[in-house]
Image: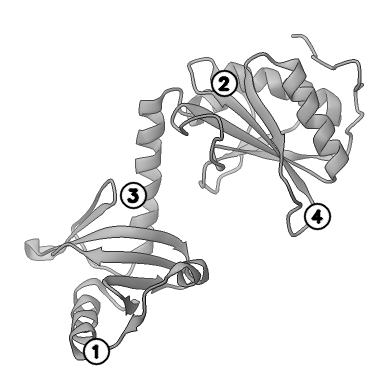
Amino acid sequence: MKSNITEGLRHNDLQGMIYPQFEIDTFRSKMGEDQDVSVIAFQVRERLPAKDLMEFIERGYDFVLDADVSSGENSRGEYTVFVEIERSSQIAENINELLYGVKKLSGMDDFSFKYYKFDEQISVSEQNLRENIPLSAEQYQSKLREYRTNTTRDFFDKTVMDSLELDGDTLKITKPFGQTVELEIVESGNRQTILQNIDSPLIEDESSMGEIFWLTKVLGDYNISKYGDSLMFSNKDQAMLLKRRN
């Protein structure tokens, strides 16, 4: 396999600068829809090496749609290099080829990756890439549904239920004896972030308190507040902003 080391960079020139863990599909694409374009993100210790890596990737691989460096550093003073590649049946081979050059620059052989928001770090091999990265828009949507359903089920861990179904943003929880609760997911994520994004007033009238009491009785002991026509459910540091459908 060709090393793709360009005239401006030599083997090991970025040694100690690139982290051996990278992320796939965690960040949004600038070049197209996420279901059609995959974003690979490398963490680099300093801005100039990050720029070198970006230029190396952009010039060395014709399958790369775009490469860019984060505009600012993160809380640890590091920079992210974003690489966009078309989602296709060849994406595992393309990432493997890209990584061959990154290994030469970094002087490291053992890389691992994390897919989307799944926590598992996976050792890099063409087989592992192929098994974990969606190769088509249909596979991407299916993987996203799987993740959202699992994280929603984990969030509602205090709820006694027979089933949980997620169709787009519509959440349907079926309780024992057939009772159902349907909710629309407006937003989910970190509790403080959601609170900062809410622009509706806190509602604490008798009707709202009655609704919250009923939801606590049916769904479990969550911290529930009402803002406008939305209900914020909190479970530890995570939250969901929901609207009742029934």
Query: Split into 4 quadrants, where in the image is the C terminus?
Result: bottom left
Cβ atoms at labels 2 and 4 below 8 Å apart? no
* Number of the label disc, if any, that sits on residue 205: 1
Q: Distance between the residues labelled 3 and 4?
A: 34 Å
**Mark 3 vs 2, N-terminal side:** 2
- Which quadrant would the N terminus be assigned to in this image? top right
Where is residue 96? Give x, y as percent: 65, 21
**Residue at the spot x=75%, y=51% of the render?**
72
Give the mark nearest the N terminus, 1 or 2.
Answer: 2
- Cα gap from disc 3 to disc 2, whole angstroms: 26 Å
Q: State the image coordinates of residue 77 (x, y, percent, origin top left).
A: 80, 55
| Left or right placement of residue 102 versus residue 16 in this view | left
Q: Residue 149 carries which label?
A: 3
Residue 109 shows in the view: no
Circle 1: residue type: Asp
Residue at point 62%, 33% (across, down): 40
